[in-house]
Amino acid sequence: MEQTLIYKILSDHRLDGKIAAGEEIGMRIDQTLTQDATGTTAFLFFEAMGATRAKTQLSVSYVDHNMAQFGPENHNDHLYLQTAAAKAGAYHSRAGNGICHQVHLERFAKPGATLLGSDSHTPTCGGIGTLAVGAGGLDVAVAMAGGPFYLRCPKVLGVKLTGKLNDWVAAKDVIFKLLSQLSTKGNVGWAIEYFGQGVSTLSVPQRATITNMGAELGVTTSIFPSDEQTRKFLTAQKRQEDYQPLAADTDAEYDRIIEINLSELVPMAACPSSPDNVKTITEIAGTQAHQILIGSCTNSSFADLMTVAKVLKARRINNMVEFAVAPGSREVLNMLAANGALSDMISAGARILESGCGPCIGQGFSPADGAVSLRTFNRNFPGRSGTSPDLVYLVSPETAVASALTGKITDPRDLPKLLSIQYPRIDSPDQFAVDDSMMEKPLSEAEAAKVQVLRPATIVVPEMPPPLPEKLRAQVLIKCGDKTTTDHIMPAGPFLKLRSNVPQYAKVVFNCFNKQGKPTFAQRALELKKKTTAGVIVAGQSYGQGSSREHAALCPMYLGVRAVIAKSIERIHRANLINFCIVPIELADPADYEKIEPDDLLQIDNLLEAIKHSNEVTIIDKTASFEFSGKLALSNRERQILLSAGLLNYTRKKTND
Ligand code: MIC
Ligand code: SF4
């Protein structure tokens, strides 16, 4: 049968299950990546599983998120990760080497390979033809230990690209177009494959911008074929041996096709405060911009930053604008330094940040009250910038730099007319300045045996969930609306440094909904836990969108939450809930959402029975005296995980069987 590229790679890596949309399959993982904010728990779980050596082709531990180092926590984490990776035979990318997705694309990702990463933007490497999927740290730990990764085979949306981008229109505008059509919700169970003549006009970093923000659509992964552009990129990275041509079969059938004519696209922005609130720049042009930030795993490639530098050369940014640039990797930063582009940006007034996630995850650069912040990032969820309320617009580097010069949101296509700036066409370099000296290589088993893993006291081994009760009695701790993100559930910013300490971090679960002078979510949950009543979270559509952070399940579990009842739950978060033994329940009739109130006491009489045999539960709202149905939709494996009190126990049991 003619196959899509995604199904070809899935078939090549299938270990268990049937390859058909909606079926759960176990797949072999060739590569894993972890980053510091999710990596400490991943490595702690890896150790807790009794695993010693990574069994993948390669596993990389990156430090890129948490580098502000206020207090000892961050550096403690870095040292733990460095020594734990050395022990496990993994690579370790040191702080300053760059953002995991950018560096992985540059140095490791291969067409046709599978990559599992404890970060939702792992599909960035789909830009080079890797089947790359984001997951929670525990799932990545299992894959690192050589276990299969389970996922439901997605339906495939084919995006046919025709035409060619016009000057000043960017790859970012391609994904904005899709976000405007598909939105951030309702895409669970889908993956995207790009095809068509327009594909060959896009370089690998441009493709990676597009696959990166597939995460915002909520799709399982996004992928481009591997072609001459891929070969060129790999050769310039001195990795030509990793190249192989790959594409879907000519008559491959997609479950749905959307066509985008690149020639017809215009510069766009995602307006506050959701990546799908897309408008054309023409519609919002003239709005005063106070802060402009360039960087993140979406837009900090060499070509992106060279475009910015060329536009800025011999010019000054507007006086009312705060402007900063965070290069995606040390390789990019070094190249900009060597060719003078860095100096052009500094002279123009840019503040240069180290290569890392930085402001994208609220590590500094929170905008002023009421300030409009333009960012080349991928997420503008409310408050993610560290200021609440905030006004963050996501834009392309072209739009960002045009606006930095004028001080107003500016269509970059107006630059020739406004400031006589011609479009700087940046060719992909024939040779990148490859330097892996900050990437520590895996040690042999004999060398690793001598390594002492450093685990300072700020790194606390997380508690595992207790078994589920036969019958659940639970109180509604919170009722959230649609599109509740993991940033709402588990804030990052100043709290990011608590990632390795669940009891401390759990204090800020749902912090943005806490009211001054009232008990916090955590206090109410712990009070309930003392009375041996469980907690339940009620939510609208698309609960848990955004990050892969398993802390959004791990911390509520620590506080006694045993179920989430929602209109719908996003893929990675649903898997994390199951991994930490929180039952994900979707409302059979979404209208019941209106009837449930905060503090209601709910009861599920036959919870365990239902988990064993059924896909439906009857929930009694004791407070409002009504009954409603919930859907479980569990695979056999998911049932076993819940019955074993979580994935860690389940994996241990399987290993001992
Ligand atoms: C993000 O962009 O939200 C993060 C921070 O990279 C997360 C991972 C995390 O929370 O550590 C992600 O995208 O998965
Ligand atoms: Fe880092 Fe931001 Fe990318 Fe997440 S989205 S990996 S925080 S740069």
Image: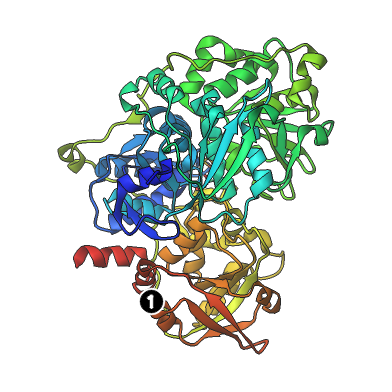
Residue 76 screen position, x and y as percent:
41, 44
Looking at this view, name the residue that lies furthest to the right: 286
- Regarding residue 177, the answer to whether it shows in the image is yes
> Label 1 CB, ligand 1: below 8 Å?
no
In the visual, does 515 lie left or right of 195?
right
Residue beneath the point at 47% across and 68% down: 558
Residue at image coords 47%, 57%: 550
Q: Residues within 10 Å of mark 1 (few under 14, many from 20)?
A: few
Which residue is identified by label 1? 467
**Horizontal side of residue 358 vs 275, given as left or right:** left
Q: How is the image coloured?
A: rainbow
**Vertical arrangement, residue 511 with respect to residue 105, above or below:** below
Confirm whether residue 347 shows in the render: no
Which residue is at the front of the view, 350 or 310?
Answer: 310
Residue 508 shown left or right of residue 402 in the figure:
left
Q: Amino acid at mark 1?
A: Pro
**How many tags in the picture?**
1
Q: Secondary structure at mark 1?
A: loop
For the C terminus, the quadrant is bottom left
Q: 254 or 567, which is in the foreground?
A: 254
Is residue 30 found left or right of 212 in the rendered image?
left
Instruction: Report which quarter residue 626 is drawn in.
Output: bottom right
- Residue 10 rendering spot, x and y as whole percentages: 36, 47
Q: Is residue 312 above or below residue 255?
A: above
